[in-house]
Amino acid sequence: MSEAEHSRGDTAADGSAENVALIAVARLVKTRGLRGEVVADLLTDFPERFDGLEYVIGVRANGNRESLRIEEHWLQGQRLVLKFSGYDSIDSAKGLIGLELAVSEAERVPLPENQFYTWELIGCRVETVSGEDLGAVRDVTATGSVEILVIEGHERELLVPMAEDICIEIDIARKLIRVDPPEGLLEF
C-alpha cells in the first residue's frame, strides 16, 4: 500500500517541533494561476486525505522544514492543486516548488487489518517459525499479484512472497515477520 508514506523526519503536521516521524504524501512540481497556487504529484493512494487537512509540512531537499497552512485544494486529473496561506503570487509560490509535503505518522490513513505500508515493513527482522534468523527486509517489490519481501540475508539476498500461508505473522510493533517457507524457497 502506498502513501509513499515513508518516514521523512521530525516535526508534527501542525508545525510544532515535536519529535515525530513524517510521511510524504505529495511533491510540489509547478506553479499554477496568478494567486500562488501550486500543483503537486500525489505520493499517496488516498487523495481524499487532503479533505479537512489544515496543515502539511514542506520538506526541502536539504531537510529543512516549514509548516504550510492549506487554504484550498482540489484534484485536477491525477494531480492536486493547493493554495497555501501567505503565498499569494506566482513569485512567492515559486519558492515552494520541489518541496515534499508530509504529515505526521500519526495522521497516516488507517489500513484494513493485515495490510501494511511498505515503509512499515522495511527494516523488520525476518525469521522462520523455527526461529532461524533470515535477515531484515530491505525492500518490498510489487509483482501484480503478491508483493515480494526483499530480505538482506546473512549470506545472500532472499525473496519471499508475502502470501498469508508463508508470512504467518507480521508484528509491526516488534518489527518482526515470521515465515513458514515451503520446501525449496530458501535454497540456492
Image (cartoon, helix red, strand yellow):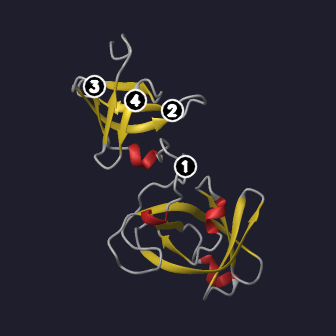
Image mark for residue 167: 4
Cα separation, mark 1 vs mark 4, equals: 20 Å
Rounded to the nearest angstrom, the CA distance separating label 3 from label 2 is: 20 Å
Kindly identify which residue carries mark 3: 129
User: Which tag, 1 or 4, sits closer to the chain's start?
Assistant: 1
Q: CA distance from mark 1 to mark 3?
A: 28 Å
Q: Which residue is mark 2?
A: 147
Sequence-first disc among 4 and 3: 3
Q: Nearer the viewer, mark 1 or mark 3?
A: 3
| Label 3 Cα crowd, 10 Å radius (few <14 / some 14-19 / many 20+) | some
Against 3, residue 72 (above or below) is below
Q: Is residue 110 left or right of residue 8?
A: right
Locate residue 183, reporting x and y percent.
Answer: 36, 11
Q: Quadrant of residue 34?
A: bottom right
Task: Please name whichever residue, 67 or 103, is drawn nearer the observer in this view of the structure.
Answer: 103
Q: Callout 4: helix, strand or loop?
A: strand
**Separation of marks 4 and 3 at Cα, in angstroms:** 10 Å
Q: Nearer the viewer, residue 41 or 95?
A: 41
Residue in the image at 59% along x and 73% along y: 53
Q: Is residue 181 left or right of residue 97?
A: left
Give, as a three-letter code, the residue at label 1: Ser
| Mark nearer the N terminus (1 vs 3) | 1
Residue 137 vs residue 99, the one in the foreground: 137
In this figure, which residue is indicated by the disc labeled 1?
A: 2
Work out how far the residue at label 2 is from the one at label 1, CA to CA, in angstroms: 12 Å
Question: Which quadrant holds the N terminus?
Answer: top right
